[in-house]
């Protein structure tokens, strides 16, 4: 269980669209893992990566500091805007925002797909690209999931 995140119906829809765009080919568990990481970022509220993310919209549209480049590929490539979540997708997003996180990714703050658009996954790296304070945790289908190195973001890892 995680903290409940205050949300609007628009937040629910945007999270559902991100989950679909990022991981629809990875089944319900894959989509829940992606959604959990996004919710974890709001819950973490730690510097420098996640300080000030007040809501799910802030987390979805967050950019890499100093670059203006979105953290999430579906925002960058526009696939976020083409998704049409059904009621089951919206309910999954609601559940995550109400604190029901996917247990496998409950401690993860990062994920990435090293082979976007491919039917295979390239090997996961020991650290998340452009994020040296991370450590590889596990992979699920096309995605690699990461946790913070010890001592980083203690507000989240208490």
Image: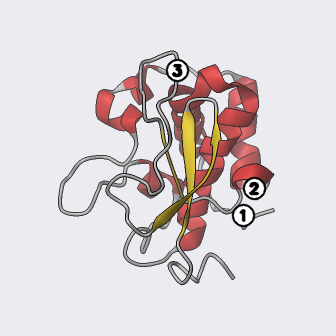
Residue 52: % across, % down: 42, 73
Q: On the rendered structure, is 63 left or right of 80?
A: left
Residue 21: % across, % down: 50, 27
Classify mark 2: helix, strand or loop: loop
Cα–Cα gap, marks 2 and 1? 4 Å
- Residue designated by label 1: 4
Q: How packed is label 3: few (under 14 Cα within 10 Å), some, or many (20 or more)? A: few
Identify which residue is drawn at 81% across, 62% down.
1
The reply to whether dot 2 and dot 1 touch (C-beta < 8 Å) is yes
Cα–Cα gap, marks 3 and 1? 35 Å
- Residue designated by label 3: 120
Q: Earlier in the sequence, mark 3 or mark 1?
A: 1
Classify mark 3: helix, strand or loop: loop
Classify mark 1: helix, strand or loop: loop
- Residue designated by label 2: 98
Residue 75: % across, % down: 36, 36
- The disc label shown at residue 70, or none: none
- Of 156 and 80, nearer the camera is 156
């Amino acid at each position: 269980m995680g903290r409940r995140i205050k949300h609007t119906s628009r937040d629910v829809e945007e999270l559902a669209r991100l989950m679909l765009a990022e991981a629809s080919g990875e089944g319900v568990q894959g989509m829940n893992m992606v959604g959990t990481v996004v919710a974890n970022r709001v819950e973490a509220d730690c510097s420098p990566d996640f300080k000030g993310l007040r809501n799910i919209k802030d987390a979805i549209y967050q950019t890499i500091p100093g670059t203006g480049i979105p953290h999430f590929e579906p925002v960058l490539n526009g696939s976020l805007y083409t998704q049409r979540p059904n009621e089951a997708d919206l309910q999954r997003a609601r559940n995550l925002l109400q604190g029901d996180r996917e247990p496998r990714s409950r401690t993860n703050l990062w994920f990435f797909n090293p082979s976007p658009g491919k039917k295979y996954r390239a090997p996961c790296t020991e650290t998340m690209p452009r994020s040296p304070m991370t450590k590889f945790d596990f992979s699920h289908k096309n995605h690699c999931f990461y946790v913070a190195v010890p001592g980083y973001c203690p507000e989240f890892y208490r």
